[in-house]
Image (cartoon, rainbow, N blue to C red):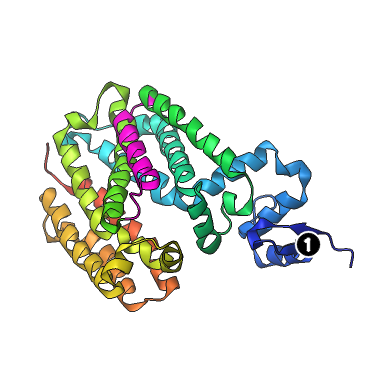
C-alpha cells in the first residue's frame, strides 16, 4: 500500500511499481554509484525522478543506450585493429612503424571517430517504426521502445550527426571510410538494403570494413592521406571483409524470432538453419588458412585463427538454442581479432 506506480513504455502499457523496481535492483549488483546492470531498473529511475528525466546525465545515458550493444564489436574492435597495424606500419606500406607514445596521443581521436560514426549508424538503424517494433521484442530497453526520446527527436539527432561526422573526418582523417560507410548505412536502412539477405550481408561487410579502415586512417595517416594509396593495407582490409561477408550471418541465428516477425529475409531464414551454419564453418576454415598465407606464415601462424574459429563453430553446431547462438556471436569477434595480430608475426615487408 502506498507504493507509487509509473507508466513505463518498456512493458507496452503495463504499470510498473516501485516494488518491481526494488526487486530489479536486488537482482542486479551495483556498478559505481547507483548504476545497476539491469537496464529496466535504470529506466524506472528516470521515469520516476523528474529531476533526472531531462538532465545532461539523462541525455548522455540515452546516447550510451543507442550504442552500448556495439561498443565492443565496433569501437573496441576497430581500435584493436588499428594499433597492431600501426605498430607494423612498414609491412602495410605506410613507410614507418608508429611508437606507443604516438599511438596513445592519437587514441582519443580514434575512439571519438568510431563512437560518433557508431551513434549515427545506430540512430539510422533504430529510428524507423519497423525497427522500434522489432526492438520491443529483441531489445526492449533501447531508447525508442522505452520512450526516452521521440522518433522525431531521434530523426533530428540523426540528421545532425551527418555534418558532425563529416567535419570530424575532414579534420582527423577517415573521410573515405566515413562517406562510404554513411552511404552504405543509408542504403541498408532507407533503400531496403536489409530486405535481401545477401545484399544485407554485403552491406554489413562494407560497413565493417569502414569501421576498421577509419580508425586505422585516423591513427596512421590522418587527414593528409588515404588508405587507397597503400595497396598492401587495402588488400589486407579486403581479405578481412571477405571473412566478415562469409560469416557475419552468425549474428542472425540469435534474432530469428524478431526477424520472422518483421519478415526480414536473413540468410538462415532463406537458405535454412543447418546450411547457414555449415556456410560459417566452411568460411572459418577457408579464411583461417588464407589470412596466414597472406602474411607468409606457416602452420604455427594458423594456430591462432584456427583455434578461436574452432571454438566458435563447435558451439554454433552443437548448441543451437537461442542462448547458444548468442554465445556464438560473442565468440565471433575473438576469431576476427586473431587476424589482427598476424602482421606482427610476419617477417614480410611491403
Q: Residue furthest bottom?
A: 318
Front-lying residue, 33 or 208 = 208
Is 59 situated left or right of 17 in this image?
A: left
Q: Secondary structure at mark 1?
A: helix
Q: Give the image location of residue 237, x and y in percent.
A: 22, 43
Is 182 situated left or right of 18 in this image?
A: left
Residue displayed at 44% across by 50% down: 70
Q: Quadrant of residue 101?
A: top left
Is 337 situated left or right of 32 in this image?
A: left
Give the magenta-colored segment's residue range.
Answer: 172-195
Q: Quadrant of the N terminus?
A: bottom right
Residue displayed at 22% across by 35% down: 89
Q: Is residue 228 magenta?
A: no
Front-lying residue, 201 or 151 = 151
Q: Is residue 194 magenta?
A: yes
Front-lying residue, 312 or 198 = 198
Residue 346 seen in the current view = yes
Residue 29 seen in the current view = no
> Local crowd at mark 1 within 10 Å, few (<14), some, or many (≥20)?
some
Residue position for label 1: 18
Residue displayed at 57% across by 44% down: 151
Front-lying residue, 31 or 138 = 138
345 w.r.t. 91: above or below: below
Q: Give the image location of residue 325, x and y in percent.
A: 39, 69
Q: Give the image location of residue 275, x and y in percent.
A: 24, 72
Q: Give the image location of residue 343, x and y in percent.
A: 20, 45
Residue displayed at 46% across by 45% down: 122
Q: Quadrant of residue 235?
A: top left
Q: Quadrant of the C terminus?
A: top left
Amino acid at each position: 500500500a502506498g507504493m507509487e506506480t509509473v507508466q513505463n513504455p518498456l512493458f507496452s502499457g503495463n504499470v510498473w511499481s516501485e516494488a518491481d523496481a526494488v526487486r530489479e535492483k536486488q537482482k542486479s549488483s551495483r556498478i559505481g554509484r547507483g548504476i545497476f546492470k539491469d537496464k529496466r531498473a535504470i529506466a524506472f529511475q528516470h521515469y520516476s525522478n523528474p529531476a533526472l528525466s531531462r538532465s545532461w546525465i539523462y541525455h548522455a545515458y540515452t546516447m550510451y543506450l543507442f550504442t552500448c550493444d556495439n561498443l565492443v564489436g565496433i569501437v573496441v574492435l576497430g581500435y584493436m585493429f588499428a594499433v597492431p597495424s600501426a605498430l607494423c606500419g612498414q609491412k602495410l606500406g605506410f613507410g614507418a612503424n608508429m611508437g606507443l607514445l604516438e599511438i596513445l596521443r592519437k587514441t582519443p581521436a580514434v575512439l571519438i571517430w568510431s563512437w560518433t560514426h557508431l551513434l549515427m549508424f545506430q540512430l539510422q538503424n533504430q529510428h524507423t517504426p519497423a525497427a522500434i517494433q522489432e526492438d520491443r521484442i529483441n531489445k526492449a530497453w533501447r531508447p525508442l521502445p522505452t520512450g526516452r526520446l521521440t522518433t522525431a527527436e531521434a530523426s533530428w539527432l540523426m540528421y545532425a550527426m551527418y555534418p558532425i561526422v563529416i567535419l570530424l573526418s575532414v579534420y582527423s582523417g577517415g573521410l573515405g571510410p566515413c562517406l562510404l560507410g554513411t552511404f552504405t548505412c543509408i542504403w541498408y536502412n532507407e533503400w531496403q538494403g536489409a530486405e535481401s539477405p545477401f545484399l544485407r550481408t554485403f552491406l554489413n561487410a562494407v560497413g565493417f570494413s569502414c569501421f576498421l579502415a577509419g580508425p586505422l586512417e585516423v591513427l596512421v595517416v590522418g587527414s593528409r592521406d588515404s588508405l587507397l594509396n597503400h595497396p598492401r593495407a587495402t588488400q589486407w582490409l579486403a581479405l578481412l571483409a571477405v571473412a566478415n561477408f562469409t560469416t557475419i550471418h552468425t549474428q542472425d541465428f540469435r534474432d530469428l524470432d524478431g526477424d520472422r516477425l518483421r519478415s526480414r529475409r536473413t540468410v538462415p531464414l532463406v537458405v535454412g538453419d543447418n546450411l547457414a551454419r555449415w556456410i560459417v564453418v566452411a568460411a572459418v576454415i577457408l579464411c583461417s588458412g588464407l589470412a596466414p598465407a597472406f602474411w607468409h606464415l606457416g602452420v604455427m601462424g594458423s594456430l591462432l585463427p584456427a583455434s578461436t574459429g574452432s571454438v566458435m563453430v563447435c558451439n554454433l553446431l552443437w548448441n543451437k538454442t537461442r542462448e547458444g547462438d548468442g554465445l556464438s556471436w560473442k565468440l565471433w569477434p575473438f576469431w576476427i581479432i586473431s587476424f589482427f595480430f598476424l602482421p606482427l608475426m610476419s617477417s614480410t615487408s611491403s
